[in-house]
Amino acid sequence: MNIKSLFETKAEKLLNIYITAGFPKLNSLEQIIPALSNAGTDIIEIGIPYSDPISDGPTIQMSNAQAINNGITLEAIFNQLEKIEVNTPLVLMGYFNSILQFGIKEFCKQCKNVGVSGLIIPDLPIDVYLKKYQSTFVENELSNIFLITPETSEERIQFIDRHSSSFIFAVSSSSTTGNSKNIEDSQEYLQGLKEMNLNTSILVGFNIRNRSNYEFVSQYASGAIIGSAFIKHINNSQDIIDDVSNFVKNIK
Amino acid sequence: MKNYQVDTNGYYGEYGGAYIPEMLYPNVNQLQYTYLNIIQSEKFKKEFEDLLKNYVGRPTPLYYAKRLSAYYKTNIYLKREDLCHTGAHKINNALGQILLAKNLNKKRIIAETGAGQHGVATATACALMGMECDIFMGAKDIQRQAPNVERMKMMGARVVPVHSGSKTLKDATNEAIRDWINNPSNTHYIIGSVVGPHPYPDMVARFQSVISAEVKKQLDTNPDYIIACIGGGSNAMGIFYHYLNDAVKLIGVEAAGHGTETNMSAATLALGTKGVLHAAFSKVMQTKDGQVIEPHSISAGLDYPGIGPQHAFLEDEGRVMYDSVTDKEALIAAKLLSKTEGIIPALESAHALAYLEKLAFKDSDNIVINLSGRGDKDLETYTKFDQNEY
C-alpha cells in the first residue's frame, strides 16, 4: 500500500518500525519485512546504511557499520526489495550522500519500481528539496517525510506541514537516536503539537522502546516510530522471524 | 573583480550549503543570520584584535629564510604561524568563535581535533573565557598526539576519545556534531577548519584571513607564489584570502600519504568526488556507493577525507593549483627546515615545505610558505623517521 493511502484510511495508533537494511545479515530484509508485516506493523522504514550517520546514536551506528561490512549497497537493497511482496507501506530512510551518489532520478525511479512510497532524508534541507528535487519525487509518487524537533519554531512547523503529504516525523527530544530519555518528559511538547491541529498526521520517534511508550505518544499523535530498541532486540537473534513477531506483538 | 567568496545562500558555485538534520536547524540558522553582524561590529573587532595582538602575539613574523633560500636558489619567506600562542594558526579561529559564542550566550564549547592543535587552541580559548569545554578526538589520534592531549587536560578541557570508524578526525567531527544535536541550546560548536555547514567555511576563513592581511603589510610587492598545506583547508584559506584577486600563484598541498596511486592517502581533491560530508557539499573521498573512505596521512591534522567547499570551488575555477606530497616527502622537508633554519615545523606544515622540491621557480621569485604550526607534537614521529623506523 502507498503511504499516503494509509493515512487517508487510518491515522491512529500506527506503529512504524525501523530496520537497517543488511542487518544483522546481508539478506535479512527478506525475512524481517514479511515478519513485521504479518505481525501487524503499519509502516516499515528501511534504513540505507551509511558510514557517517550523524543523527544516529551508537545502536544504529553499529547496525550501519555491520551492514556495510556485510556488503550491503543501495543497489542490493533495491534488488532485495524487488523480491519482497507485502501490503505494508515501505519508507526508505537514508543520508543524502548515499542517494546523491546513486543518482536522485534513478533512486526515485527504483523506489517506485520496488514499491517504496515514502522517503526520510534527515540531512536534505527542505529548501533544497523544494528547489531541486520535489518534482522528481512527485513524479515517482514519493512522499517526502520531514522531521521536526522540540526546538523547531511554530512558524517552521507550519511551513513543513504545508509541504508534507503523508506524515511528519516528530522527534521527541533534542537528541540522536537511541537515547534513553523519558518519553513522558515530552508530554508538554506533544500536547502543544496536538493543539496545533496540523493538516498532516504526526508520528513520534526517538525514546520509544515499549508498549507503554507507544500508548503514551498515541494519545497525542497518530502513532510511534521505533528504531534502536528493535535493532537491539534482533541483534544476535537466533530465530529472527520469531523475534521480530514477538517484538511487534509486545507493542500492539 | 571575480567573486570567490560565499554567496547569500551559503554556496561557492555549487559547493557548500548546509546539509544539516532538522535537529541542528535552530543553531545553524541562528549562526547564519547573526554571524556577520556580530563579527563586523566595532565592539567585536576591537576585542578580537586586542586578543590577537596581546594574547596570541600577532602579527606573526614573515621571516626571510636565508639558508633555505640559498639551498633552493630562490627567495623563501615563512609566515610564522608556529609562533602564535599554542603553536599554530588554529588559535585565530578559536578566539574568534569563542567571542561569537559569548555573544550568543552559549555556556559550553565543543570541538573536534585531529592533530590536537585545534583542540589545544579551543581549550585555551575556553580557559581564557571561563567556559566549559569538551574536545572530541579520535582514539588513534590521542595516541599519536599525546602531548597535546595533556595540554588540553591541563587547561581544564575534557578530552572525549572517539572509537567509531577510523578513530581519527572524520569520526571526531561526527561525534562533535552528535553532541551538538544532543545539547542544542547551551552549546556552541567551534569547528576547526573551513568545513561544515554554512556559515562555518566563511566564518573560519574570515577569522584566519588575518594571516594574509598581515603578509600584505609585510611585503612591499606581491609574492610570486603562496604555498600552504591543506587538510580541511583553514591555514591555506587564511593565507590565500586577501590574494584571491591578485596576480599571485596560489598552491594548496594535500597529504598524499603513501601516494595517490595507493589506497593509503588523504588527498581529497586528487582522489575525491562530489558529495556531502559533515553537512557541506564538496569533494569527498568515497566509494561509488557514497561510503566515506578512511583516509591515511602521517599527519593527523591532514588525515581527513573531505575538504572545505571553497577549495573545491577554487580548484574548479582554476584559481588555486592543488597538488600533493607523500608522508616521506613531508618528513624529509621537516628535517631540512630543522637543519637549515633551526625551525622544527609541524608535520602538516612540512607538506607545504616539501612542495619546494616540485616547484619550478626562478632565482628571482619570491615564495611565501605558510608555516602553520610548530613540530613539538610530532617529535616522536620525527625521531622514528631518523632511526629509519618509518
Image: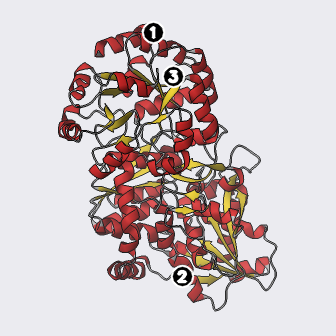
Hey, which quadrant is residue A185 in on the image? Answer: top left
Label 1 sits on a secondary structure element that is: helix
Q: Residue at x 31, y 25 (%)?
A: A11
| B127 with respect to B19 (left or right) | left
Q: Which residue is mark 3?
A: A23
Q: Which residue is mark 1?
A: A241
Q: Residue at x 64, y 35 (%)?
A: A106
For mark 1, name the chain. A
Residue A89 in sight from this viewpoint: yes
Which amino acid is tagged 2?
Answer: Ala
User: Looking at the image, is mark 3 or mark 1 earlier in the sequence?
Assistant: 3
Give the image location of residue B316, x and y in percent.
69, 62
Q: Residue at x 51, y 22 (%)?
A: A23
A57, above or below B152, in the image: above
The single residue placed furthest to the bottom in the displayed view is B220
Label 2 sits on a secondary structure element that is: helix
Label 2 neighbour load within 10 Å: few <14, some 14-19, many 20+: some
Check chain identity for marks 3 and 1: say if they share one: yes
Give the distance between the C-alpha atoms of the residues marked 3 and 1, in whole angstroms: 13 Å
Which amino acid is tagged 3?
Answer: Phe
Give the image location of residue A164, x and y in percent.
40, 39
Check chain identity for marks 2 and 3: say if they share one: no
Residue A69 in sight from this viewpoint: no
Label 3 sits on a secondary structure element that is: loop
Give the distance between the C-alpha atoms of the residues marked 1 and 2, in whole angstroms: 65 Å
Q: Which residue is mark 2?
A: B213
